[in-house]
Image (cartoon, helix red, strand yellow):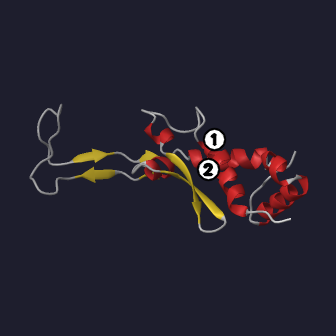
Amino acid sequence: MTIKLQPLALKIAERLRDFATRQGNVPFAKGDLRKSHVTEPHGKNDAVLSANTPYARAVHDGRPATTIKPKRKKALAWKGGAHPVKSVKQPARKGNPWLARAVADLEREGLEFLAPEVGEQVADELTAALRKRGLDVRRR
């Protein structure tokens, strides 16, 4: 029996995306971050889940305090601002690791959802292989 790994990797990545984008897990302001999650094939046998917004990593991992200064002008100004300013200080932001929580949820659920496609024995072997890589995957 030959099993193509990439379709399985994509199925796992899609399941991970389901966990990551659940209401209450992914940070939600306007919904852009939730909508930005995509799964794609990577190489011959792998798949990737990513959030395609420029700020996704800063939201997930947090970021240090930042001072914003003008690049070309002497001051910063924006619509609604009371007056131009020389700099703006933004405080550090704590991370909100929604993807890490999604991985933990998938570990708790296990790979039972793959069994109809690959069979119980292969699902057990996949679980064992992931455990060897350090994931705490459970089977029901």
- 73 lies left or right of 90: left
Residue 76: x and y in percent read 15, 46
Residue closer to the observer: 104 or 5: 5
Which residue position is annotated with label 2?
Answer: 100
Residue closer to the observer: 33 or 2: 2
Q: Amino acid at mark 2?
A: Ala
Which quarter shows the N terminus?
bottom right
Which residue position is annotated with label 1?
Answer: 18
Residue that protrudes farthest toward the left in the picture: 74
Callout 1: helix, strand or loop? Answer: helix
Which quarter shows the C terminus?
top right
Residue 119: x and y in percent read 87, 53
- 41 lies left or right of 117: left
Crowdedness of circle 2 by 10 Å Cα count: few (<14), some, many (20+)?
Answer: few
Pair 2/1: label in front: 1
Q: Residue at x 87, y 57 (%)?
A: 124
Residue 23: x and y in percent read 58, 32
The answer to whether residue 60 of the structure is visible from this angle is yes
